[in-house]
């Protein structure tokens, strides 16, 4: 017993097996997936951080990242093939994953993110984006020497200022939605005038890309969902533009009603807002009636957009991207069990009543008096 | 407060039971229950199971107190006679060894997958076993002290981690409550037993508690701390991952913590902390079961306790090497799950009945 503690020292050596030099690791911050020229293969672009000061060349702007592109039949094989070019790949800090539209036309999305979800290092909080152009170009765009992955990642923080950005889609969320056959929208990234830009979105249904949206659609979808966190409603009064800034959501209520097999979805959202710009020369924002009028105009504007997107969802994409299936499932479980397979059809025929209530609570630091 | 007599206090009893229960169950529980129930109502199952077991604990305490049980093994001897009691005791010991092995194995599996890929699993297992041996030379009192120290730490860290998850939790994923009626909930009643492993130990702790009148409250407190944590865990995990996804992921609780990041504090990713604290919990659970296995052997063979400790090292080690892959590990847990009700419910009730008959005959 007395010498037993000597043996206890041996395991203290554990952990040496897994020591890795950080300079010899490739820290991946972003990945892009494209179709390869070869048949049945996908092309993977990894964006790897380059630690500063590792190159000795003077007066040459050193990029903070490097991209490695390989192609293989499966994603994991591609990652392993990239080891022929670069150091051991570590995906613990991967922030984004870009998927090209053409890939989704060929391969179900579930298959594409499968490896990342299974992997022990990639986190479920990694964000997924869609691209029109090859992801290789997007990840290769050195925006003022910044790392493209980080630029894209940080753009999502603007959702409090604009309603033209979808809620960030994490890998975990995507995986959950794909498991429960829910359809969802996925934010797209593009290049505009040499800059990275979040623009448009894709609609995914049953792991396939069934349509694309533009920025107005995204804003309207956010309104429909009550996901708007900020941004502007542009409207026109007496032929002069005005803008209403959204401050905060005050309520959101989704109720579903069944009439036989016919579904009615009632959505009610309420927001507080501010009159932030008014070009009308005879404005009178100290009058309550004037503000009430503006509220009405803004509400009509929102309703008009929402009507358009609802029409699009029901007739063009034929799927409920807005996640209303959850409410149907929760409020009418029996009906849901019966019509689970036909949900898209049920949704396409459903009546959607949308009500928005915008309350203007202030008009900034200046209001007109006439 | 004399500490030298090797008796434990109520708080120590509670933390031993809590630490014994908080093992691998917490990391897989949302999946095992949801698989059976197939709806987000698993938390109802948990609460039902918990209440049932809590009531049963009260009953057991009453029964064992009535017979003034100081040591379970001698009590069994009174019921079954010398040799049969030894045999049953041996079965119980084998179960203890099984659980101890399983916990150390689950720990090594988790560490191998998430933390140390290159390190030989044998080293991980051996480290934990030897550390346990070192702790166990101090018998139950030492374990009690370790548990009292680790339990609050675990609870605080886990709750902190959970607190940050609020932004990814969507409560509507937990609805509809009882959407498929009561039947799936009834079906799921038997599931998730793995998470309750540990509660059966209070039967064996009867003799070492200092204040006999506080056993019931101690056992119940020790039982409800993990229960509450389980319910919170289940609710958060299912609300975040949705039912179909929970059924698909191997370690739901870890996947759930990987679903969000925290901005603003110097560390963004929290699963590391969960893994670290959970290694401590694995260690506690393992050490406690190991202790009872060694203690049981001492009672059965009347030999020295430290010999048994040393003899069990290779046993536990090789048993942990038997399952070859993740599926077999989960199978082993199912197997232990079948023995568990027998140890917790069957054995005490039968023993009580036999002793009751014998004693009444003697007095009559």
Image (cartoon, coloured by chain):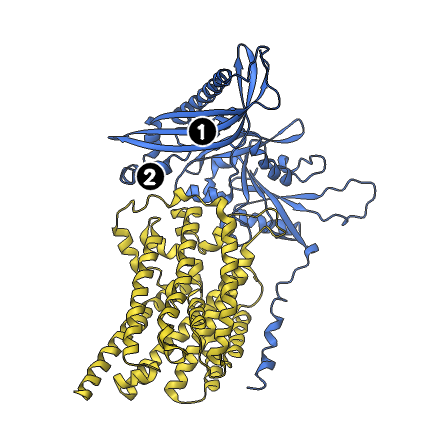
Chain colours: A blue, B yellow
Residue B122 is labelled as: none
Q: Are there few (<14), some (14-19), or many (20+) residues within 10 Å of tag 2?
A: many
Residue B122 location (% of width, % of height): 53, 71
Q: Which chain hosts label 2?
A: A
Residue B134 location (% of width, % of height): 54, 79
Give the residue displayed 53% in from the left and 34% down from the top. A187
Residue A97 location (% of width, % of height): 56, 42
Q: Foreground: B148 or B134? A: B148
> Is the Cβ of the residue at disc 1 closer than 8 Å to that at disc 2?
no
Q: Foreground: A55 or B264? A: B264
B236 vs A243: above or below: below
Q: Foreground: B79 or A251? A: A251
Instruction: For residue B272, say whether it is visible.
Output: yes
> Hey, which residue is sitting farthest left in the picture?
B364
Gap between marks 1 and 2 measured at Cα: 24 Å
Q: Quadrant of residue B70?
A: bottom left
Residue A270 is labelled as: 1
Q: Quadrant of residue A88?
A: bottom right
Give the residue displayed 51% in from the left and 42% down from the top. A170
Please tell me which of labels 1 and 2 falls first in the chain: 1
Circle 1: element type: strand
Circle 2: element type: helix
Q: Is B177 positioned to the left or the right of B360 in the image?
A: right
Q: Foreground: B160 or B287? A: B160
Instruction: For residue B314, say whether it is visible.
Output: no
Q: Are there few (<14), some (14-19), or many (20+) residues within 10 Å of tag 1?
A: some
Residue A108 location (% of width, % of height): 45, 40
Residue A329 is labelled as: 2
């Amino acid at each position: 017993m007395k010498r037993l503690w000597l043996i206890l020292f041996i395991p203290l050596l554990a952990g040496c097996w897994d020591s890795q030099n950080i300079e010899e690791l490739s820290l991946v911050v972003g990945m892009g997936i494209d179709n390869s020229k070869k048949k049945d293969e996908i092309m993977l672009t990894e964006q790897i951080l380059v630690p500063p000061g590792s190159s000795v060349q003077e007066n040459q702007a050193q990029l903070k990242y490097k991209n490695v592109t390989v192609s293989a039949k499966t994603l994991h094989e591609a990652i392993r093939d990239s080891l022929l070019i670069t150091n051991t790949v570590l995906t613990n800090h991967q922030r984004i994953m870009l998927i090209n539209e053409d890939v989704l036309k060929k391969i179900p999305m579930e298959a594409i993110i499968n490896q990342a979800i299974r992997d022990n290092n990639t986190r479920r909080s990694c964000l997924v984006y869609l691209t029109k152009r090859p992801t290789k170009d997007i990840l290769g765009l050195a925006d003022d020497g910044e790392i493209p992955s980080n630029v894209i990642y940080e753009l999502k923080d603007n959702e409090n200022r604009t309603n033209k950005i979808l809620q960030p889609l994490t890998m975990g969320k995507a995986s959950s939605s794909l498991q429960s056959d829910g359809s969802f929208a996925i934010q797209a990234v593009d290049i505009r005038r040499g800059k990275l830009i979040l623009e448009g979105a894709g609609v995914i249904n049953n792991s396939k890309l069934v349509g694309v949206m533009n920025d107005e659609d995204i804003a309207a979808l956010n309104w429909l969902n009550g996901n708007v966190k900020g941004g502007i409603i542009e409207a026109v009064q007496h032929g002069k533009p005005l803008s209403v800034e959204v401050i905060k959501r005050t309520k959101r209520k989704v109720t579903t009603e069944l009439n036989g097999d016919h579904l009615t979805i009632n959505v009610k959202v309420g927001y507080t807002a501010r009159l932030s710009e008014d070009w009308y020369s005879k404005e009178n924002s100290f009058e309550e009636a004037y503000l009430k009028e503006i509220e009405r105009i803004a509400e009509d504007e929102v309703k008009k957009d929402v009507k358009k997107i609802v029409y699009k969802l029901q007739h063009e994409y034929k799927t409920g991207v807005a996640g209303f299936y959850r409410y149907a499932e929760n409020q009418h479980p029996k009906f849901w069990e019966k019509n689970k397979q036909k949900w898209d059809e049920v949704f396409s025929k459903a009546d959607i009543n949308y009500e928005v209530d915008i309350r203007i609570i202030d008009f900034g630091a200046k209001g007109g008096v006439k | 407060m004399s500490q030298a007599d090797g008796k434990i206090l109520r708080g120590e009893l509670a933390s031993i039971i809590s630490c014994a229960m908080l093992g691998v169950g917490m990391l897989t529980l949302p999946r095992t229950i949801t698989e059976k129930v197939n709806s987000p109502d698993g938390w109802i199952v948990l609460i039902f199971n918990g209440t049932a077991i809590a009531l049963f604990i009260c009953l057991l305490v009453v029964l064992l107190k009535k017979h003034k049980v100081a040591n379970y093994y001698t009590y069994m001897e009174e019921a079954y006679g010398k040799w049969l009691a030894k045999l049953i005791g041996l079965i119980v010991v084998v179960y203890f060894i099984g659980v101890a092995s399983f916990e150390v194995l689950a720990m090594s599996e988790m560490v191998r997958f998430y933390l140390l890929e290159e390190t030989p699993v044998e080293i991980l297992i051996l480290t934990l076993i030897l550390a346990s041996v070192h702790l166990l030379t101090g018998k139950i009192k030492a374990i009690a002290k370790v548990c009292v120290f680790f339990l609050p730490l675990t609870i605080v860290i886990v709750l902190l981690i959970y607190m940050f998850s609020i932004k990814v939790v969507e409560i509507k994923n937990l609805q509809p409550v009882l959407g498929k009626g009561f039947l799936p909930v009834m079906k799921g009643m038997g599931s998730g037993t793995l998470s309750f492993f540990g509660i059966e130990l209070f039967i064996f702790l009867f003799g070492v508690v200092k204040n006999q009148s506080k056993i019931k409250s101690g056992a119940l407190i020790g039982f409800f701390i993990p229960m509450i944590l389980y319910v919170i865990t289940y609710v958060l995990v299912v609300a975040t991952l949705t039912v179909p996804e929970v059924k698909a992921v191997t370690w739901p609780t870890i996947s759930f913590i990987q679903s969000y990041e925290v901005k603003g504090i110097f560390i963004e990713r929290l699963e590391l902390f969960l893994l670290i604290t959970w290694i401590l919990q694995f260690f506690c659970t393992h050490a406690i079961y190991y202790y009872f296995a060694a203690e049981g052997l001492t009672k059965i063979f009347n030999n020295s306790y430290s010999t048994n400790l040393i003899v069990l090292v290779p046993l536990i080690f090789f048993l942990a090497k038997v399952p070859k892959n993740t599926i077999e590990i989960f199978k082993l847990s199912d197997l232990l799950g079948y023995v568990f009700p027998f140890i917790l419910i069957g054995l005490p009730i039968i023993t009580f009945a036999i002793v009751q008959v014998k004693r009444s005959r003697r007095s009559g």
